[in-house]
Image: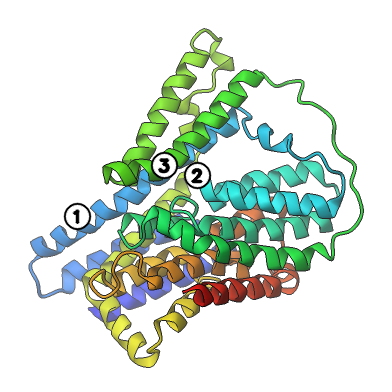
Amino acid sequence: MDTLILIAFVIGYALITIENKIHINKAAIALLTGSLCWTIYVLFATTYPETIVSQLIEHVGDISQIIFFLIGAMTIVELIDSHQGFDVISKLLTTNNKRILLWIISFITFFLSSVLDNLTTTIVMVTLIRKLLSDKTDRLYFSGMIIIAANAGGAWTPIGDVTTTMLWIGGQISTVNIMLKLFLPSLVSMVIPLSLISVKIKGNFEKNNKQNTESIVPTFEKNIVFFLGISALIFVPIFKTFTHLPPFMGILIGLSILWIVTELLHKNKEEKNKITVSNALRKIDIPSVLFFLGILVAVASLEATGLLTSLATSMSGAISDIKIIAITLGILSAIIDNVPLVAATMGMYDLQTFPIDHYFWELIAYCAGTGGSILIIGSAAGVAAMGIEKIDFFWYFKKISLVALIGYFAGAFLYLLLL
C-alpha cells in the first residue's frame, strides 16, 4: 500500500513539474493525485474505513483554514486592483534613473509582499514595470529582482507567503517572533542580489506621463479601497494575537467590511460602472487555490499513513544537524514546490520535539520562502513573472539563479549567526 501511494504521489508530482510541456493544469493533476492517494489508502489499508474517513475529515478541516484564508486574501487584493488602488504605488516612482528605479521597486516589492503575498505582489509589480520600461532586457532583470524581493518579503511575516502562513496556522511560529527573527535575514537575501544585479542596470528611461483618462474610478474611491484593503490584511495577525481564533476568521471579517464599503460606494451607480465583490470573485485565481487543496490533501495522505514519520526518521539518521536539513529543504524548494515541502516538514516533526518559535521552524520559514527564488519555477512568484514577461527558464538560470543563491546563503548565515 505504501509503495502504491508513493508511486501515485511521485508520478503526480513529476507531472506537476512539467505542466508547461504536457499542457495540463497542475491543479487538475494535484486534485487527482490527492484523491488517488486517499483512495489507495482506504482500499488497501488493514484499518477500518471509518477510521480513515475520520483522519481525512480531520486533515481537510486543517487544510480548509488555508483555503478560506487564500480566497479571502485574493478577493481583497482583486478588489483593490479593480478599483485601480495600486496607482497609489505608481505615484511613488518619480525617478527616471533605471538603477534608482530598480532599488525603489525592489524595496516596495519587499515590504508590499510582507503584507499582501509574494504572488500578488509579483503580478502587480511586473505589470507596473511593463508599463514603465520599453527595453526587454531591462524588464527581464527587473522581473528577476522582483521575484527575489517578493519571496524575501513574504518570508518574514505570517501573511506574506503561503508556507509561512501554513506554519503560522499550524502553531509552529508566532506573529511578532517570526517578524523579529527573520526581518534582517530576509532583507539581506534581497539586498545582496540587488547590489549585484544593479551593476548591470545603467542609464535612464523615459517616463510615461500619460494619465488614464478612461478611468471610471474616482481618486477618493481608489484611496479608500486601497488603504482599507491593506488595513484588512494587516489586521489579520493582530486579530489572531488577541482572539486566538484562526486567521481565516480575521480575513473574513476584513473582507466583509470591505464588501460593505464597496457596496455603499457603488449603490447609486449604473450597473455597468459598479465594481462588486461578485466580479472580484470571478477574477481570482481559483485554479491556484485548488492546486493548494490537491497537493495538501496528497501530503496529508503521506502523513496519515506514517510515511512522513518514516522519512523524518531516515533524514534525521542520515543528517543529524537540523540546520542542514532546513537549508537543504530550502534548496529543494527551488525544484519542488515549497508548499508540499513545508507541509511534509510539518508532518515529519511535531511540536513536542520542536515547540512553537523553535529556531528550526523559523529557519524552515526563511529557507522555504527564499529558496524558491533560485530557479524561476521554484515559487509561485517566479511562475507568475515567467508567464507575464515570457521569461526563459535558462535565461533566468544563467543571469539570476547564482545571485539568488548567494543571497539565500547570506541570509541563512546571518540568521544562524544571530542565534
Q: Of label 1 and label 2, which has the lower sequence position?
A: 1
Q: Residue at point 56% right, 46% down?
A: 120
Q: Mark 2 — residue?
A: 285
Q: Mark 1 — residue?
A: 57
Q: CA distance from mark 3 to mark 2?
A: 9 Å
**What's the amino acid at mark 1?**
Ile
Q: Tell whether 347 sits left or right of 198.
A: left
Q: Tell whether 193 sits left or right of 342.
A: right
Where residue 71 sits, quadrant-wise, is top left
Q: Position of residue 72 (x, y in %)?
A: 41, 39
Q: Mark 3 — residue?
A: 71
Above or below residue 278? Residue 288 is: below
User: Mark 1, residues whose alpha carbon is within 10 Å: few (<14), some, or many (≥20)?
Assistant: few
Which image quarter is the N terminus in? bottom left
User: Mark 3, residues whose alpha carbon is within 10 Å: few (<14), some, or many (≥20)?
Assistant: some
Q: Closest to the observer: 152 or 128?
A: 152
Q: Residue at point 67% right, 46% down?
A: 125
Q: Disc 1 vs disc 3: Cβ atoms closer than 8 Å?
A: no
Above or below residue 56? Residue 124 is: above
Above or below residue 328? Residue 176 is: above
Total numbered labels = 3
Q: CA distance from mark 1 to mark 3?
A: 20 Å
Q: Is residue 292 visible?
A: no
Where residue 69 sits, quadrant-wise, is top left
Q: Position of residue 206 (x, y in %)?
A: 90, 42
Q: Closest to the observer: 340 or 180?
A: 180
Q: Of label 1 and label 3, which has the lower sequence position?
A: 1
Q: Is residue 192 visible?
A: yes
Q: CA distance from mark 1 to mark 2?
A: 25 Å
Q: Tell whether 10 sits left or right of 231.
A: left
Q: Closest to the observer: 140 or 278?
A: 140
